[in-house]
């Protein structure tokens, strides 16, 4: 499922963040994005995900241009994952029907089976207001399980394993790799080693995108 971005520009108020960005990602490609803090990586990711609308230029994802259509085809792990004040299970399914088998498979890929089984209410445990009853790494793993369970053709990962210890991050990345083999994946990471295996790595700098060589 391809992503075609043409001449995309975006500003917050009068602060121009992205300038004339074009990017062509073919179905099944794995793409990395690097760049300094504040360079606009998360902004670009939110635009690709259909959370913001382009102010200039266009984004076409899986042939769709309308943000609500785009959102259906994208599973995203945001840099600061949002949890609903609901159970772990509801945070993974987002209210869609899913078999327990699928939910546990997603939990296993996100390396949280053991933790959930240790909780008295297991998958029905309440995560608290804004996830206040879970740690940052647990919240991140719930968001990863949610993205895996959504089974969308395009996966966007924004520092998706940044809150995990090295061993857990490695295991989650390996699981993500096998589960996303036939999908289109765009990952943002500060850790270059998490981007090995990418078809291309882009750098965002001064609002412009270039291919790293
Ligand atoms: N909602 C917003 N309103 C106004 N300015 C914003 C908003 N979100 C981000 N910015 C600004 O836009 C710039 C780019 O932010 P963005 O989050 O895209 O950077 P980033 O490359 O993801 O950084 P990091 O590596 O720290 O996550 C920053 O200067 C930031 O302060
Ligand atoms: Mg960011």
Image (cartoon, helix red, strand yellow):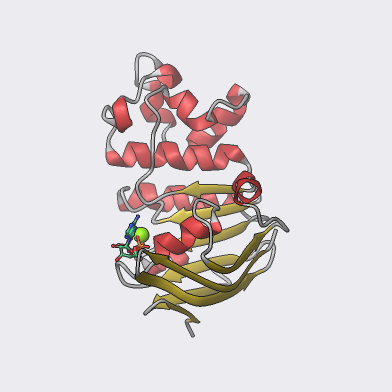
Front-lying residue, 125 or 82: 82
For the N terminus, the image quarter is: bottom right
Which residue is situated farthest in the front direction here? 14
Residue 19 at x, y percent in the picture: 46, 77
Query: Is 104 placed above or below 198 here?
Result: above
User: On the rendering, which quadrant does ligand 2 occupy?
Assistant: bottom left
Q: At x 63% / y 44%, what residue is drawn?
A: 72
In the rendered image, is residue 141 in sight? yes
Residue 200 at x, y percent in the picture: 55, 74
Residue 68 at x, y percent in the picture: 61, 46
Q: At x 55% / y 42%, what residue is drawn?
A: 148
In the rendered structure, the answer to whether residue 90 lies left or right of residue 137 reads right
Front-lying residue, 111 or 211: 211
Query: Is 55 placed above or below 69 here?
Result: below
Quarter of the rendering containing residue 205: bottom left
* Count of numbered badges drawn on the protein: 0
In the rendered image, is residue 196 in sight? no
In the rendered structure, the answer to whether residue 35 lies left or right of residue 33 reads left
In the rendered structure, the answer to whether residue 94 lies left or right of residue 79 reads right
In the rendered structure, the answer to whether residue 98 lies left or right of residue 156 reads right
Which residue is situated farthest in the right direction here? 63
Residue 123 at x, y percent in the picture: 45, 21
Quarter of the rendering containing residue 22: bottom right
Q: At x 35% / y 37%, what residue is drawn?
A: 139
Which residue is situated farthest in the bottom direction here? 213
């Amino acid at each position: 499922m391809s992503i075609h971005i043409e001449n995309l520009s975006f500003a917050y108020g009068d602060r121009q963040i992205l300038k004339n960005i074009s990017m062509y990602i073919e179905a099944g490609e794995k793409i990395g994005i690097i760049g300094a803090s504040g360079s606009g990586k998360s902004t670009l990711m939110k635009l690709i995900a259909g959370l913001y609308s382009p102010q200039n230029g266009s984004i076409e994802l899986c042939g769709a241009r309308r943000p609500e259509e785009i959102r259906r085809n994208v599973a995203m792990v945001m840099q600061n994952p949002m949890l609903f004040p609901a159970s772990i299970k509801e945070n993974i399914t987002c209210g869609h029907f899913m078999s327990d088998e699928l939910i546990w498979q997603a939990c296993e890929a996100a390396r949280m089976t053991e933790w959930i089984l240790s909780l008295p209410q297991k998958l029905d445990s309440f995560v608290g207001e804004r996830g206040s009853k879970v740690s940052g790494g647990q919240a991140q793993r719930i968001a990863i399980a949610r993205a895996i369970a959504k089974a969308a053709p395009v996966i966007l990962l924004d520092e998706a394993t940044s809150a995990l210890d090295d061993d857990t991050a490695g295991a989650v990345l390996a699981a993500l790799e096998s589960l996303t083999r036939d999908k289109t994946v765009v990952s943002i990471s500060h850790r270059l080693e998490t981007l090995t295996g990418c078809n291309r790595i882009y750098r965002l700098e001064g609002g412009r995108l270039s291919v790293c060589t």
